[in-house]
Amino acid sequence: ASIACEGNTCGAEEFDLEYDRLIFTVGAKTTTFGIPGVEEYCNFLKQIEDAHQIKNAIVNCFESAGLPNLTEEERKKELTFVVVGAGPAGTEFAAELMDFIEGDGPRFYTDLLKYVSVKIVEASDTVLRPFDKDLRQNAIQKLTRALKIKGIDGDNIQPTEFLLNKKVVEVTENSILFGDGKKLPYGMCLWAAGNGPLPITTNMIEALEGTDQQPSQEFARGRIAVDPWLRVIGGNGRMFAFGDCSCVSSFPRLPATAQVAAQQGEFLGKLLSRDYEIDAKDESGMLLPPLALGSEKTLSERIAAMAMHEDEIAAPFMYLDLGILTYTGHGSALAQMTFIPEDSEHNKKAVHINVTGKIGFDLWRTIYLLKQTSPKNAALITLDWMKTTIFGRDIAII
């Protein structure tokens, strides 16, 4: 759509745009599973606007709890922070919140810190499911540690608690209702319990009605089904999709991570920039694998050609799990690096190299800096980390 602005008002006009190739990579949204009250009362961790809302909500909780006319129970309720979802996103948020409580809380809210509690709610019986068991235990120990804070009784508080096997059935303005009938009063709730398709993704799937995309939804489940070369099934070889909005037919469900999307984007860029006939069909109208038109093949393409007994096809997309990282607070992180990939065909599990503590934290930050798209971004992030370390976090409400 086009945006036309006049004075202080703007209007959007829709228009049609023809294409030769369509690359669809819109990502996903946080799913609410249709649970009443989640959209209305929870904060999310997806867009830049969400970060502003979360910061304001945290500061508002502390400021509200400081009002002189509140009882102790009301203060505890205002300073109960609930995180729904114990995956990497939820636990990293809890870790950063703990850092704020420990590092910046004494400067602004010393008298209120004894009322603070952080509840991490998870519907399953485990946290950080993608990680090995010993790393999950390390994360629980780090997040539930006692915080040493001067100026309060005993100088220690232990605010964080994991609530496992807790299914949220409703969220109201002041409390969360669980499947066992119990209620949890809260001041702020962050919802980090999985991804779901955006409306534009659903519309695209509906637009492919009558093609092979519809039966493919049995495994895609709301995401756009693509073939091993990331061509949209039912798109006649002219449509491509990758990232969180897609599901590759030849793979088990890939994790919704930037690592997967980055590898897919690099693969598709190389496929489209080389000399391949991407939308060739056989006599029955079936879409063929991308056919080489004379360009020199890479090693991976030659190996794929041998495996498929075909000399002139492009190598399909292959995901390489390099490992996962997550921050656990107080200058500590988990790093699970893949040494030997999983071999499901021969029932062999992946072999990992696991790193924790300060070394894991240094590795976590280094990799995040190296993944930035420009030296400018890396420099700005480094300066922001230095500013926070020296001056603390800014609590001004935006």
Image: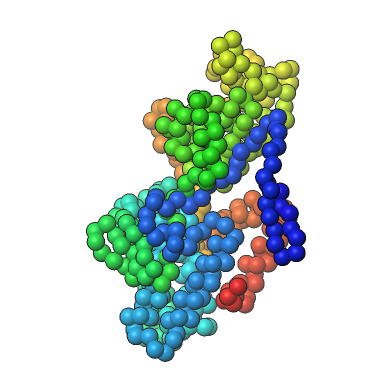
Task: Tell me residue 285's x, y (percent).
Answer: 57, 15
Q: Where the C terminus falls, by quadrant?
A: bottom right
Q: Residue placed farthest to the bottom in the image? A: 68
Q: Residue placed farthest to the right in the image? A: 6
Task: Tell me residue 244's x, y (percent).
Answer: 53, 43
157 sits to left or right of 241? left
Q: Toward the viewer: 36 or 256?
A: 36
The residue depicted at 52 percent of the width and 83 percent of the height is 108
Task: Tell me residue 45's x, y (percent).
Answer: 51, 58
The residue depicted at 52 percent of the width and 67 percent of the height is 54
159 sits to left or right of 229? left
Tell me if residue 312 comes above or below residue 203 in the rendering. Answer: above
Q: Evaluate whether residue 118 shows in this view.
A: no
Task: Tell me residue 40's x, y (percent).
Answer: 44, 62
The residue depicted at 55 percent of the width and 33 percent of the height is 207
299 sits to left or right of 135? right
